Image (cartoon, rainbow, N blue to C red):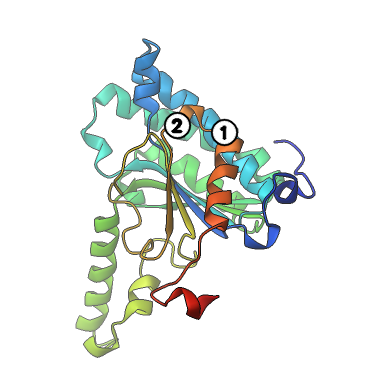
Amino acid sequence: MRTPAKNAARDAGLDPTRIPKHIAIIMDGNGRWARQRGLPRLAGHVQGYATVRAMVESAIDLRVQALTLYTFSSENWSRPKNEVDGIMRLIAHAARNELDELHENGVRVIVSGRFDDLPEDVRAELRHEMNVTKDNNRLILNLAINYGGRTEIVDAVRAIAAKAANGELKPEEVDDELISAHLYSPHLPDPDLLIRTAGELRISNFLLWQIAYTEIWVTDVLWPDFSENDLIMAISDYQKRVRKFGKTADQVV
């Protein structure tokens, strides 16, 4: 990874005091990128991996605190087996090959999703990566793998229901904060900015609870072609918005 610029946000024309603390990205378009070039779909995922690497570097430069990437959804298991197997190999490869640089650059890796359902070799690589980087605090890289927003809420409700059945809490104690505390990564703040590539105008079962007041930015750029300039454009647009959280504009000015 390159040495972070001292004033990367200011150099890019951004307000360094209004950089989103947490950016989430739906990385869409790998398959279309490959198809446009007459390549197998897995070639798009390989190129998408290169974009992930670049975006982690950019997030560090811009002093983003947390970056959540929709890496593999719980619905993606229905894709062709050779594609799924290839993605799993790519995830394990990335966890192994990027570990040293991520650790040196102060990146903490975490995983959100049903971790135990992943192949054992993938779990082993990710578990090692998370253990080595657990004390880093420059950037949290949250990989949403085998992740589904509805599944996350179901798992949270099940955990809360079990505590209620054991007498550990009363039904009237269930509120927003309690549910948030039982999600996959409860220590992360809700995303300030959600970016979706490839022009699709849907959420795709991603962070359904957490994005209640998240600003959304959509681009037609396919994920393998997404660049630091595109990220800067998204943040620039975010900085022009007034986040009201249910209030009037006059109340938040």
Q: Nearer the viewer, residue 141 or 207?
A: 207
Q: Nearer the viewer, residue 164 or 225?
A: 225
* The furthest residue to the front: 250
Q: Nearer the viewer, residue 52 or 192?
A: 192
Q: Which residue is mark 1?
A: 227
The answer to which of marks 1 and 2 sits earlier in the sequence is 2
Would you say the residues marked 1 and 2 are in contact, meaning their CB atoms lie under 8 Å apart?
yes
Q: Which residue is pictured at 48% across the width and 55% down the height?
A: 193
In front: 167, or 74? 74
Q: Residue furthest right?
A: 6
Residue 246's x, y, as percent? Answer: 38, 75
Q: Residue at 39% x, 27% y: name it.
A: 30
Q: Amino acid at mark 1?
A: Ser
Question: Rounded to the nearest whole Å, what is the CA distance between mark 1 and mark 2?
Answer: 9 Å
Residue count near mark 2 (Cα–Cα under 10 Å), binned few <14, some 14–19, many ≥20? some
Compared to 235, does 90 lie above or below?
Answer: above
Query: In the drawing, does residue 148 fall left or right of residue 14?
Result: left
Please state the horizontal and vertical placement of residue 236, each as a whole percent of the image. 58, 50
Res 43 quadrant in image: top left
Amino acid at pointer 2: Val
| Above or below: residue 21 compared with residue 84 | below
